Image: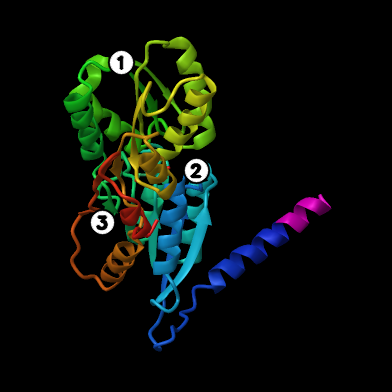
Amino acid sequence: MKKKLLALGVAAALSLSLAACTTPEEGTNGDTLIKVGFSQIGSESGWRTANTDSVKASLSKDNGFELTFADAMGKQENQIKALRDFITAGVDVISFTPIVETGWDQVLQEIKDAGIPVVLVDRLVDTTVEDPYVTWVGADFRLEGQLAGQWVKENYPDAKIFELQGQLGSGAQIERELGFHEYMAANIIGQATGNFNREDGKVAMEAALAKYPDMNLLFAHNDDMGLGAIEAIKAAGKVPGVDIIIVTVDGVKAGLEALLEGEINYIVECNPVFGDQIADLIKKVYADEPVNKENIVVDATFEHGTFTQEELDQRKY
Ligand code: GZL
């Protein structure tokens, strides 16, 4: 009983301290800081790390923000808890990247009932809640899949393709798969998820190499899984980029280094460095200024043999 009372006391103190931090704080220029609660997925890939760096650099005190940043460590339940903590803390704006598209109805309704605007980042939600966010900024994942599919169609139309899918149920996995399959569905001999991380990509590829010995092209939904697959391909005594053509998405530094080496043949970029766009949208939402519902982050494509070291040296991530 004593333990329970102590726990209740701690919880009460914690909620008071959270409630207490709603008093406005001033920035270096004397303006009231915008209190933002940001829930990030985790650190599953080089892309996510670069995105987190960009978000933190842009949502800084010098830039007019009081940022509460919550790392969900890859678990949706941690994101939902963080979103509820933001409501309790009385933040001005909530921003988050939904790890998967579904499972947000209740907490999005709670946020709406609390009258806190949402700026959605990177991935999208599939929810019954009407008008759940004011604005979204991210990449066109369907286009990314289409660009990858187009390149494979043009260069390897008869390929026997294995597909390493990202986190199942995430907008990036769903849409990249749909886009790629518009061109190459008939050539897919197998699929497995690598959860957007290098180790799971390696493990999934080890199994795929044993199961599909005639595989000659890999489409990986991100560089990190592609890099894990390269380890498995080499361990199997095959040459990545030659015996098995590799196409990925993201364009992080390690991926582009593998492209320069010829171990990855084609990369569709998905630029993670858009913290400045997130900051601009939050300021406009806070000031009740009009914003577009969707804000697309522009991507590029990179091919082995044309991309150069000088181009890599000039990139931000
Ligand atoms: C895409 C992003 C994806 C990246 C992966 O915008 O959600 O999640 O492609 C990351 O590298 O893990």
Where does ligand 1 appear, by image quarter?
Answer: top left
Which dot marks residue 44? Answer: 2
Q: Position of residue 129 (x, y in %)?
A: 30, 44
**Is 115 above or below relative to 230?**
below
Q: Position of residue 215 (x, y in %)?
A: 37, 15
The amino acid on which the numbered mark 1 sits, given as a three-letter code, is Lys
Disc on the earlier residue, 2 or 3: 2
Q: Secondary structure at mark 3?
A: strand
In this view of the protein, which residue sits in the foreground, 231 or 130?
231
Disc 1 to disc 3, C-alpha distance: 40 Å
Farthest right residue?
2
Disc 2 to disc 1, C-alpha distance: 28 Å
Task: Report the residue marked by disc 3.
Answer: 135
Q: Secondary structure at mark 2?
A: loop
Give the magenta part as a residue range. 1-7
Task: Report the residue marked by disc 1.
Answer: 160
The amino acid on which the numbered mark 3 sits, given as a three-letter code, is Thr
Q: Ligand 1 within 8 A of label 2's CB? A: yes
Residue 191 in view (yes/no):
yes
